[in-house]
């Protein structure tokens, strides 16, 4: 039976895995963390579960709208109908727009958990090296072998798909691979994020999501305002600008926390009460620096190797989905895998 290994269980890896499994291909996923979702992650702590990465998603393409309908049907996604605000020139004002935004329910990670059902996943498995190995007498029929950080090996797979941020794909793939040229054109930028909770509501209920023209902060959301959340606290998420995050990447969390609380007080124009809980996280590869869309899937048919991720289709949750569909289809169509079907 034809087989494929997929590294990464963000939305891109999971969507590609479902496509391959649908074609009857033996599909195995490898994930360095203890759960699926990647940047769609929702942090679970003793005091709350909150969206630490992607805050909401949009669905502009017919393909992704189909997936959205499935999630809505199974209760894994809902519209987040909030009144957007904008902080500009020291003023916080409503900023109506026509965009329809959705969230996973009860948290963003529910989208990934739904996609992961019935898939075969190795968790806590950080792939450190990949190797395409051919027999001396048949260079056409190689196999992929994967090695994790503990020295465990997995293989041999007929095909390999890397569903990772571009820099992480680059680090794993051979420097001579034809895919390197495209990967080198994509830079990814970081993001400091802070979740902070208060025992009581700190602002008017109409303030739910704020786009910020601010030197440090890019976005603020009120977790408790999203549909389907069970929250005992007034929990806020703050995401920082990429330039500031890069400059401050080596700061201790306590400094980031203090700076962001000050910024929250400034933007809401209030004196903040003492917070009851905090959680700070640095996203090394949060988003592509520029929104670019590759016209063709990034696949090397000779070695049956593909790379995908949000960076390939303009960033965002929808971009990750589209890139996974495009790349898995290209792997299947070029006869790389599934040729015996
Ligand atoms: C702070 C922040 C806010 C965002 N806000 C939004 C938003 O509001 N709306 C929106 O649409 N998008 C948003 N995004 C972007 C969105 O989260 C991503 O576009 C999308 O989730 C990317 O999915 P992916 O599958 O391409 O990659 P990822 O989710 O990054 O998946 C990659 C996976 O690979 C794993 N991995 C990495 N290296 C290895 C290895 N060597 N071995 C094994 N496993 C490995 C990782 O643990 C991860 O699970 C945001 C992102 C961040 C960080």
Image: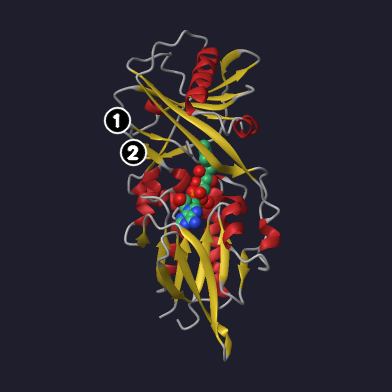
Is residue 120 shown to the viewer in this render? yes
Measuring 61% from the left and 68% from the top, which residue is drawn there? 299
List x then y, in percent, for residue 293. 66, 53
The answer to which image quadrant residue 298 occupies is bottom right
List x then y, in percent, for residue 322. 55, 55
Measuring 44% from the left and 78% from the top, which residue is drawn there? 2
Tell me the residue that label 1 is attached to: 230
User: In the displayed structure, would residue 101 be above or below residue 207?
Assistant: below
Taking the image as shown, residue 255 lies to the left or right of residue 75, namely: right
CA gap, disc 2 and disc 1: 8 Å
Q: Are marks 2 and 1 in contact (CB under 8 Å)?
A: yes
Assess disc 1: are there few (<14), some (14-19) or many (≥20) residues with their C-alpha within 10 Å of its C-alpha.
some
- Looking at marks 2 and 1 on the same chain, the residue that comes earlier in the sequence is marked by 2
Measuring 62% from the left and 66% from the top, which residue is drawn there? 174
Label 2 CB, ligand 1: below 8 Å? no
User: In the displayed structure, would residue 174 be above or below residue 39?
Assistant: below
Taking the image as shown, residue 119 lies to the left or right of residue 191, namely: left
Question: In terms of secondary structure, where does tag 2 sit?
Answer: loop
List x then y, in percent, for residue 290. 68, 44
Taking the image as shown, residue 111 lies to the left or right of residue 129, namely: left
Towards the viewer: 104 or 248: 248
Question: In terms of secondary structure, where does tag 1 sit?
Answer: loop
Tell me the residue that label 2 is attached to: 106
List x then y, in percent, for residue 243. 65, 32
């Amino acid at each position: 039976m034809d087989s494929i290994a997929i590294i990464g269980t963000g939305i891109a890896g999971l969507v590609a895995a479902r496509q391959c499994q649908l074609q009857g291909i033996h599909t195995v996923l490898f994930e360095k963390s203890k759960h699926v979702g990647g940047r769609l992650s929702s942090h679970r702590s003793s005091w709350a579960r909150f969206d630490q990465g992607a805050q909401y998603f949009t669905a502009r393409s017919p393909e992704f709208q189909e997936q959205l309908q499935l999630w809505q049907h199974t209760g894994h996604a809902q519209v987040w109908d909030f009144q957007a605000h904008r902080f500009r020139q020291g003023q916080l004002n409503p900023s109506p727009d026509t965009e329809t935004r959705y969230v996973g329910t009860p948290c963003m990670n529910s989208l990934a958990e739904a996609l992961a059902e019935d898939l075969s996943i190795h968790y806590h498995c950080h792939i450190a090296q990949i190797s395409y190995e051919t027999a001396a007498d048949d260079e056409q029929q190689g196999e992929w072998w994967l090695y994790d950080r503990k020295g465990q090996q997995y293989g041999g797979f007929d095909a390999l798909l890397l569903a990772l941020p571009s820099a992480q794909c680059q680090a794993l793939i051979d420097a001579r691979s034809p895919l390197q040229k495209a990967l080198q054109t994509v830079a990814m930028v970081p993001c400091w994020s802070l979740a902070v909770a208060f025992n009581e509501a700190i602002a008017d209920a109409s303030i739910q999501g704020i786009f910020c023209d601010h030197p440090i902060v890019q976005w603020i959301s009120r977790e408790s305002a999203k549909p389907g959340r069970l929250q005992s606290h007034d929990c806020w998420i703050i995401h920082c600008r990429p330039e500031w995050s890069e400059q401050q990447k080596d700061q201790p969390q306590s400094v980031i926390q203090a700076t962001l609380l000050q910024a929250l007080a400034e933007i809401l124009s209030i004196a903040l009460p003492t917070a009851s809980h905090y959680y700070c996280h640095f996203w090394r590869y949060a988003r592509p620096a520029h929104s670019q869309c590759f016209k063709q899937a990034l696949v090397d048919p000779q070695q049956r190797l593909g790379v995908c991720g949000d960076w390939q289709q303009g960033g965002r949750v929808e971009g990750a989905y589209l890139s996974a569909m495009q790349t898995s289809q290209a792997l299947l169509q070029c006869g790389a895998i599934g040729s015996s079907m």
